[in-house]
């Protein structure tokens, strides 16, 4: 496994990069901002490289390998887990110059893009052809497709279309051995050998640097309708989610905001007109042709009428619907403003256990006297659990740490998983052993060794050091 690089190794790498004519930054003022992501962890790299082509990426990986210098691939640094932080120093390989759309084939519903292309740019290019790419993290306008692949990003639409892994047909990449790798297919079916595409999706840049991605596109729905349902308690909203997901109409978005989230939004955007005195709000959306929308909306509304429902109404028009989704989108940054050192987890449980999870989280918050605000992609059973504390107050931080461990234990006891879309990074590496057994860990380490024999790719992530 890779360690912090020696001065000699860095000097040799610098010289080799200069000889190769690569665009590199090494002054601390230029490398500083490449040392953090949205986790607020910071560890500045020694060097930042800005390749423009796949071949340049391959050459840089080989040079880093020759000198045993750690290499952390970077999209736009929006990861929430420390995944993009070069905790061992070394070289950050920024994909920000590789933003081209290489192919767009509406007939095959596919698009090939360079890994640094922004998710929002993909959507903008696909839309005129009546198509979209389903992964829709709230950060879509400023995160990259490569980052989406590496974190297996999701978003509200995952409830209907799955996560990034389900929407990628193939990859071009460079392994930690500096070898070019092409995976996958350009067809909607394919079963020849192991599925290396899915393996690299979610690997957080620890197996290979992704340079090009073949995206599977979907037709844009003709129209959407949004429902706003408020409940006396978050647990009642959780039961409604299970009922909605049990019936045959799959909504395209099912988002939950608990009481704390609603308070936050009310303070930030009083004009949003959110209901007072309720325990939780669900935003439910159905899509499809105009002919089927009314039926779909009625089916979802009927399922959402569980005990504890306070109010259920459809958004009057597209403008009201857009305002409701804007409220949801503003939540994460608003929470960050209130508690800059908050911890944001993204646990998942089977939807039938969501209500139980919410009740357990409420009990943990009370036991540890820690404010916990929950919202998230409830249709997948995926909750963003925000532990709000002041990192400068040791007692608060200790209580939040205990609460976090208790939340993870509760999630696993309910048959869930520690991360639905953000991944592990360095923040959660110490908890991975709670979920993965020794056999899985050993196989994963063997795979890591096969892809990256010298352990140069993004060390300190996923596995505890
Ligand atoms: C306000 C906000 C809202 C968010 N909402 C969501 C959400 O709804 N859903 C969700 O899933 N996430 C969400 N995120 C998290 C984040 O945006 C995603 O994880 C995103 O996919 C990261 O993309 P990035 O380009 O910023 O990658 P980075 O943060 O730069 O990198 C993330 C990881 O990917 C690796 N990586 C990046 N590019 C490559 C590459 N080309 N090859 C190999 N490895 C690579 C990095 O090494 C790192 O491990 C949110 C973040 C913010 C700040």
Image (cartoon, rainbow, N blue to C red):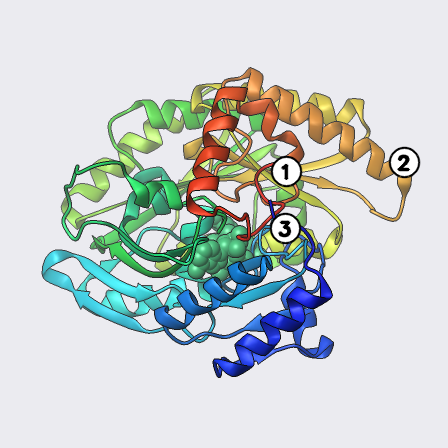
Relative to the observer, which residue lies in front, 452 or 51?
452
- Chain-order first, disc 1 or disc 2: 2
Q: Tags 3 and 2 in contact by the CB under 8 Å rule?
A: no
- In space, the residues marked 3 and 2 are separated at their CA atoms by 23 Å
Give coordinates of residue 354: x percent, y percent.
Answer: 51, 24
In what element is the residue under mark 2?
helix
Relative to the observer, which residue lies in front, 156 or 135?
135
Residue 451 is drawn in which quadrant? top left
Residue drawn at x 64%, y 36% is 464
**Which residue was labeled with disc 2?**
395
Residue drawn at x 72%, y 58% is 42
Relative to the observer, which residue lies in front, 263 or 215?
215
Q: Tags 1 and 2 in contact by the CB under 8 Å rule?
A: no
- In space, the residues marked 3 and 1 are separated at their CA atoms by 9 Å
Discs 3/2, front:
3
Residue 419 appears in the figure: yes
Binning the other alpha carbons within 10 Å of mark 3 as few (below 14), some (14 to 19) or many (20 upward) gives: many
Q: Which residue lies furthest to the left in this view?
A: 107
Give coordinates of residue 101: x percent, y percent.
Answer: 29, 71
Question: Which quadrant is home to the N terminus?
Answer: top right
Residue drawn at x 49%, y 63% is 75
In what element is the residue under mark 3?
loop
In what element is the residue under mark 1?
loop
- Chain-order first, disc 3 or disc 2: 3
Tell me: residue 11, above or below residue 37.
below
**Which residue was labeled with disc 3?**
82
**Which residue was labeled with disc 1?**
428
């Amino acid at each position: 496994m890779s360690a912090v690089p020696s001065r000699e190794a860095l000097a040799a790498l610098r010289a080799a990069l200069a000889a190769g004519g690569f665009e590199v930054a090494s002054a601390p003022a230029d490398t500083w901002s490449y040392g953090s992501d949205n986790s607020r962890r910071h560890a500045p790299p020694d060097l930042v490289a800005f390749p423009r082509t796949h071949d340049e990426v391959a050459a840089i990986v080989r040079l880093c390998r020759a000198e045993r210098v750690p290499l952390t691939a970077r999209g736009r640094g929006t990861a929430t887990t420390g995944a993009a932080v070069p905790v061992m120093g070394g070289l950050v390989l920024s994909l920000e110059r590789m933003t081209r759309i290489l192919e767009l084939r509406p007939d095959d519903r596919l698009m090939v893009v360079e890994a640094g292309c922004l998710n929002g740019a993909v959507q903008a290019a696909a839309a005129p052809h009546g198509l979209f790419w389903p992964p829709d993290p709230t950060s879509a306008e400023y995160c990259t497709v490569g980052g989406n692949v590496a974190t297996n990003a999701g978003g509200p639409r995952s409830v209907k279309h799955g996560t990034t892994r389900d929407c990628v047909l193939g990859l071009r990449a460079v392994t930690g051995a500096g070898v070019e790798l092409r995976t996958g297919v350009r067809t909607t079916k394919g079963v020849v050998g192991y599925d290396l595409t899915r393996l690299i999706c979610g690997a957080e840049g620890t197996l290979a640097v992704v340079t090009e991605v073949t995206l599977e596109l979907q037709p844009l729905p003709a129209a959407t309708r949004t429902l706003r349902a408020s409940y006396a308690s978050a647990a009642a909203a959780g039961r409604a989610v299970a009922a909605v997901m049990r019936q045959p109409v799959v909504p395209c978005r099912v988002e939950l905001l608990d009481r704390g989230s609603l308070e936050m939004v009310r303070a930030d955007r009083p004009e949003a007109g959110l209901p007072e005195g309720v325990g939780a709000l669900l935003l439910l959306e159905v899509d499809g042709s105009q002919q089927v929308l009314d039926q779909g909306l009625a089916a979802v509304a009927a399922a959402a009428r569980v005990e504890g429902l306070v109010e259920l109404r459809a958004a009057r028009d597209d403008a009201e619907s857009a305002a409701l989704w804007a409220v949801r989108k503003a939540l994460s940054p608003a929470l960050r403003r209130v508690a800059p050192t908050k911890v944001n987890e993204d646990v998942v449980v089977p939807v039938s256990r969501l209500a139980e999870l919410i009740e357990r989280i409420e009990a943990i918050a009370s036991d540890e006297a820690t404010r916990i605000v929950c919202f998230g992609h409830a249709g997948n059973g995926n909750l963003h659990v925000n532990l709000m504390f002041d990192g400068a107050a040791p007692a608060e931080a200790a209580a939040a740490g205990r609460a976090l461990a208790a939340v993870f234990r509760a999630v696993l006891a309910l048959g869930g998983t520690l991360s639905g879309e953000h991944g592990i990074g360095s923040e959660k590496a110490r908890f991975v052993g709670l979920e993965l057994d020794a056999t899985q860990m050993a196989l994963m380490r063997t795979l890591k060794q096969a892809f990256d024999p010298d352990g140069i790719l993004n060390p300190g992530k996923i596995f505890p050091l």
